[in-house]
Image: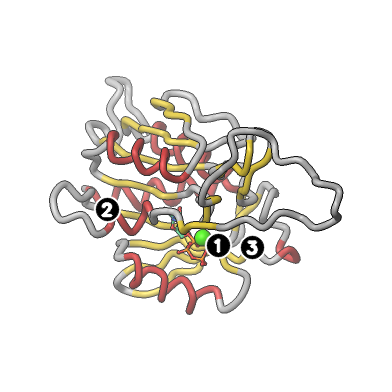
Amino acid sequence: IVDRLGRGPLSGRHILVTSGPTHEPIDPVRYIANRSSGAQGTAIGAALVRLGAKVTFITGPATAAPPEGVSVVRVETAREMLKAVEAALPADAAVFAAAVADWRVSSSSGSKIKKDGSGSPPSLSLDENPDILATVSRMTGGRPRLVIGFAAETDDVVANATAKRARKGCDWIVANDVSPATGIMGGTENAVTVIDDSGAEAWPRATKEQVARRLANRIADALE
Ligand code: CTP
Ligand code: CA
């Protein structure tokens, strides 16, 4: 919480947050995207501002509005998001809450693809997008002190997320079970497990705002 002098535990810290989905164009009217409202990312941005951080909020086309008090950078594609992240560095910490599309169409069409009447759909060739979290985690100069990734999983949540943390080289990974039965995707609540060097910490299911505040407090403690 910011005091009367405008100081909080994250005053003087610059934190970068990615949020929302990315859209990868197929043609001018169609795209590939992940499901993401951006609600958890927005809540995290707001919680960091509340603790006094200067926040650069890099967002794809999300339905949730960006939080108050951040510098907003709007992007469309994964490659644009990577460029915006690199331009926003240096930062003390980076939180990668975006649901980045893993693939883009190799050569998107400048004009609308029309049905040709044959009943056979077009085939799309895909390329893998850059991994923004891994790129920043592996930086040799200017890496943020604390790099936090997310892992949305439907099976073996903790095992998959632990492997993902090692693969990407981030400090913490915030794992959640996004199986349809949990109702978390598109909902107002989240149940996460935070994995770091010392193991996995399961947090009770709570609103996305409560999860964000707990995460922001943990970030403030780590940067102290
Ligand atoms: N991420 C990223 N850039 C990408 C893909 C993912 O920065 N191109 C980040 C996400 O923002 C998230 C973390 O990496 O913080 C994990 O994303 P996830 O989709 O769970 O991981 P992937 O490595 O893409 O693995 P999967 O095959 O399970 O989708
Ligand atoms: Ca992915």
Label 1, ligand 1: CB separation under 8 Å = yes
Residue 152 is marked as: 1
Q: Quadrant of residue 113?
A: top right
Q: Residue at x 34, y 39 (%)?
A: 83
What residue appears at the point 39 percent right and 32 percent down from the top-left corner? 49
**Residue 33's spot in the image, x, y percent?**
61, 48
Identified at 45% across, 37% down, the residue is 45
Instruction: Please give the name of the residue rendered at 76% of the width and 40% of the height, measured from the top-left corner.
Output: 114
What residue did someone put label 2 on?
A: 146
Q: Give the amino acid type for the residue marked by disc 1 in the picture.
A: Ala
Position in image of residue 69 (x %, y %)? 42, 23
Task: Look at label 2 and name its amino acid.
Answer: Leu
Image quadrant of residue 112? top right
Which of the marked residues, 1 or 3, is nearer the chain's N terminus? 1
What x and y, as percent, mark residue 161? 46, 71
Above or below residue 156? Residue 100 is above
The single residue placed furthest to the top in the displayed view is: 5
Establish if 223 lies above or below 126.
above
Checking the image for residue 178, the label placed there is: 3
